[in-house]
Amino acid sequence: MQTALLIISALAVVFFGLWLIQHSQFRNEEKKRQFELKRESQKSVSPIRLRAYERLALLLERTKPEHMLIELQQKEPQALQTWSVGQVQQYLLQTIRAEFDHNQSQQVYVSDEVWDLIVGARDQTAAFVISIVAQLPPEATAQVYATTLVSAFASNGTTPTDKALEFLKNEAKEMM
């Protein structure tokens, strides 16, 4: 009886040891498989993420006041001579909104911090476009508005757009 109990105990220890070894191997294989899946996924996602960074950099550049005013001049060469301050301001705000709306899906591919900076840059640029009108006399022309807007934006130091763009570039570099 004791011998049978001893044999059963020894077999239990052996089976438990085998189970531990096999379980450990299974876990290692699973980790390897997960790593390979992640690596393959990164290969396909990385180019998409890089394009997202490029598109968001373009969004930030396109919503700088000087760029939007150049675009306006190209579309409507006489706009600053014939439009009112309100019309130019409305055009700038619509451009900011349209550029942002067009690129909103890119938030899926960037960090929350980058996206928050981009949203902040959008909001602060729009607020800046609005605030300049309040600084002008009621009889100011669209040309005066445009000149004041560009010079105030340029002399504002590091703008939220510049901060977002710098952070975006740094994050993209880390990814490469």
Image: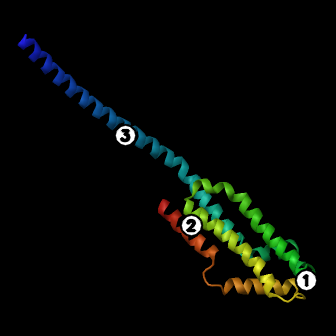
Residue 54 in sight from this viewpoint: yes
Q: Which of the two discs, 3 and 2, labels the residue nearer the N terminus?
A: 3
The first of marks 1 and 2 along the sequence is 1
Where disc 2 sits, the SS reads helix
The crowd level at tag 1 (other Cα within 10 Å; few <14, some 14-19, many 20+) is few
Distance from disc 3 to disc 1, alpha carbons, whole Å, reads: 67 Å
Q: Is residue 62 above or below residue 49?
A: below
Task: Indicate the position of residue 51 as horizontal and vertical percent values.
Answer: 61, 57
Could you say which disc has been placed on residue 31 in the image?
Answer: 3
Tag 3: amino acid: Lys
Q: Is residue 138 left or right of residue 93?
A: right
Please tell me which residue is depicted at 63% across the width and 78% down the height of the picture.
159
User: Residue at the spot x=70%, y=74% of the render?
Assistant: 125
Q: Which mark is residue 104?
A: none
**Which residue is tagged 2?**
168
Q: Which quarter of the picture shows residue 107?
A: bottom right
The image position of residue 56, as x and y in percent, is 64, 63
The chosen color scheme is rainbow
Query: Which residue sits at x=46%, y=45%?
Result: 38
Residue receiving disc 1: 81
Left or right of residue 63, residue 138 in this image: right
